[in-house]
Image (cartoon, coloured by chain):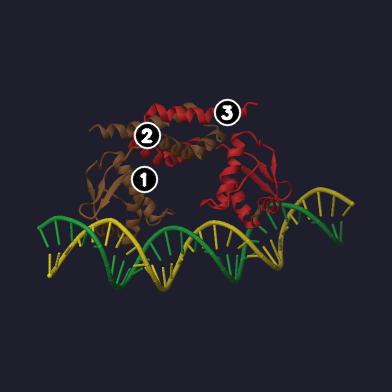
Chain colours: A red, B brown, C yellow, D green
Amino acid sequence: MLIEIDFDSSEALYIQLYNQVIKAIAANRLRDGDSLPSVRVMADELGVNMHTVNKAYALLREDGYVNLDRRNGAVVAVRVEDHGAHMESMHDNMEMIIAQAVCKNIELEEMQELVREMYEDYRRLSSL
Amino acid sequence: MLIEIDFDSSEALYIQLYNQVIKAIAANRLRDGDSLPSVRVMADELGVNMHTVNKAYALLREDGYVNLDRRNGAVVAVRVEDHGAHMESMHDNMEMIIAQAVCKNIELEEMQELVREMYEDYRRLSSL
DNA sequence: TCGTTGTTATATCCATGCTATAACACAGAG
DNA sequence: CTCTGTGTTATAGCATGGATATAACAACGA
């Protein structure tokens, strides 16, 4: 199965779906042009409501990961337009992680090594 | 003012307070042994309910940033016990940031440079 | 004793997540 | 044209969690 949902998680179902799709794209299991199951089919597969899937799809489109149209359903189409905006967004998301790491005496080199490993794990998959 | 709360934010008030305290510790504006205002005083200063502050303080204690006792109120006391657990936690928190960066074609070097800048901004403050 | 500390308990209000049912506009297949 | 399957929107109901208000408790210092 491409997408897995944890019903016991405190994370909202539509956020989980949103995240899983992004991870699948990063891991090259979903590529530009691939189409995702329709909201109704995906909802049925996951055992959730149609609107929950629709919410995730709408968010994915808003953030530039898919295109939605009435003919082909949801088609993966990563949109990279504003590099500065992406960096700024990443800065905000990284804020608390860095602060916690500083408090807990985690060295800069450890952090960068972790980032490198995680990043290259994806890149390795992308080049297959 | 040491702590600022944004009432228009979608982030829960107690989470904002929790985060602000951690950032203040990382920035060396709060140091080990410093005491935070009592739950009632802090609630009054921020304009929120006592229970909201209490929730944040309890979470800070649980995560090893302060000690709470009836004499001195909330005292900053960063507890670093399980290095592996902190790294694991950081890994989980970093997961989506990395995946998004890979999707949006942000280079590893850019990420590491950002991490380095943010980290050293804190470290610079810590050594004052 | 009095005041202040963290802590716990109850109750209420509101926003959000999720579901259910229904309907709509649009496009391809027959 | 008709039928089916897209995404999309609307409305409603239910459960959960965040925030509030009020109240009370045990512990410690002045």
The mark lying in front, picked from 1 and 3, is 1
At 26% across and 39% down in the image, what residue appears?
A: B28
* Residue at 64% from the left image edge and 57% from the top image edge: A49
Badge 3 marks a residue whose secondary structure is helix
* Residue highlighted by disc 2: B118
Q: Nearer the viewer, mark 2 or mark 3?
A: 3
Tell me how far mark 1 sits from mark 3, CA to CA.
33 Å
Q: Quadrant of the C terminus of chain B?
A: top left
Chain letter of disc 1?
B
Q: In this view, does B76 lie above or below B9?
A: above
Amino acid at the residue labelled 1: Asp
In the picture of the structure, the residue carrying the numbered disc 1 is: B63
Same chain under badges 2 and 3? The reply is no
| x then y, percent, for residue B3 | 29, 50
Q: Is residue A29 above or below residue D4?
A: above
Disc with the residue nearer the chain's start (2 vs 1): 1
What is the secondary structure assignment of the residue under circle 2?
Answer: helix
**Looking at the rendering, which quadrant does residue C3 occupy?**
bottom left
Residue A55 on image: x %, y %: 60, 53
Mark 2 residue type? Met
Q: How far apart are marks 2 and 1 (CA)?
A: 22 Å
Chain letter, disc 2 residue: B
**What chain does mark 3 sit on?**
A
* Location of residue C28 in the rendering, given as x and y in whole percent from the top left corner: 81, 48
How many callouts does the rendering have?
A: 3
Callout 3, which amino acid? Arg
Above or below, B111 relative to B62: above
Label 3 belongs to which residue? A123
Q: Position of residue A95 (x, y in %)?
A: 40, 40
Q: Which of marks 2 and 1 is in front?
A: 1
A99 to the left or right of D13: left
Q: How crowded is mark 3: few (under 14 residues within 10 Å), some or many (20 or more)?
A: some
